[in-house]
Amino acid sequence: SIVSHLHLAVDKATKKVLFGWFEYEEITRGYFVLLYHIIINYGIPARIKTDNRNSFSNLKNKVDTTQFGIICESLNIELITSSVATAKPNVERENKTFKNRLIAELRLKEIVDIDQANEYLNNVFIPKMNKIFSYEINYKTSKMRPNNYTEEELNLLISEKCTRIIDNASSIKYNNKYYIPIDPKSGEITPFKKKTECTFII
């Protein structure tokens, strides 16, 4: 069987699961997906508490040097990391519950495709679990701030960015694949000088 990793976000005040996302690996992009959907569906959180994995902090436990930390800073979200599991009891408890119940339900529904699993997780399983085990968010007392970004703006803001150098064929290389810049309006190839530096956004 193929191993998949569940990325999960829980609101501490209400125990509400805000979003979940399966990936084949535990990667930073999975947490980008979480943050994007939290903001779209609930607003911008005041604080996020995570563990000390590389997605959130470097070896010196600095969060402002990671891509996720930089994004949180730009959104004015306080990012706190901890290596102590008891510091994140809501997520740890939900992870345990999800592993037991969710796996059983996915097997019952004969869901083995990761896209179908993500759809079932967020459209069926999480709403059902929230109805039983969580409270509704009170937006009068909640520290979630209203989201004033468009979906397109959030897509650009909450993204993986890296620098690449354009080669003599006016292309760039990423993960052993080549990409050619095009004009988004005309669809035509846009030539650049060799060694032009560009930002590659995923």
Image: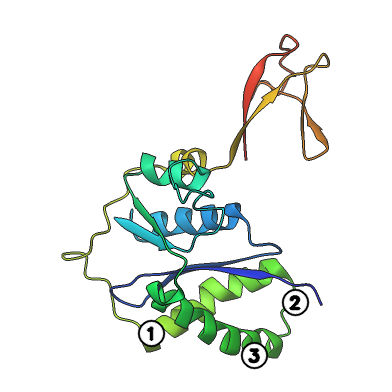
Foreground residue among 72 and 66 = 66
Q: What amino acid is at disc 1?
A: Lys
* Disc 1 element: helix
Residue at image point 79% right, 18% down = 167
> Disc 3 marks which residue?
104
Q: Earlier in the sequence, mark 1 or mark 3?
A: 3
> Disc 2 marks which residue?
112
Cα–Cα span, label 2 and label 1: 25 Å
Q: What amino acid is at disc 2?
A: Val
> Disc 1 marks which residue?
131
Q: What amino acid is at disc 3?
A: Ala
Instruction: Pick out the residue farthest to the front.
Output: 60
Image position, residue 166 (x, y; %):
73, 19
Residue at image point 39% right, 89% down = 132
Image position, residue 65 (x, y; %):
48, 40
Q: Earlier in the sequence, mark 2 or mark 3?
A: 3
Q: Report the quarter where the N terminus lies.
A: bottom right
Q: Is residue 168 above or below residue 36?
A: above
Judge the density around disc 1: few (<14), some (14-19), many (≥20) Cα neighbours within 10 Å. Answer: few
Judge the density around disc 3: few (<14), some (14-19), many (≥20) Cα neighbours within 10 Å. Answer: few
141 left or right of 126 in image: left
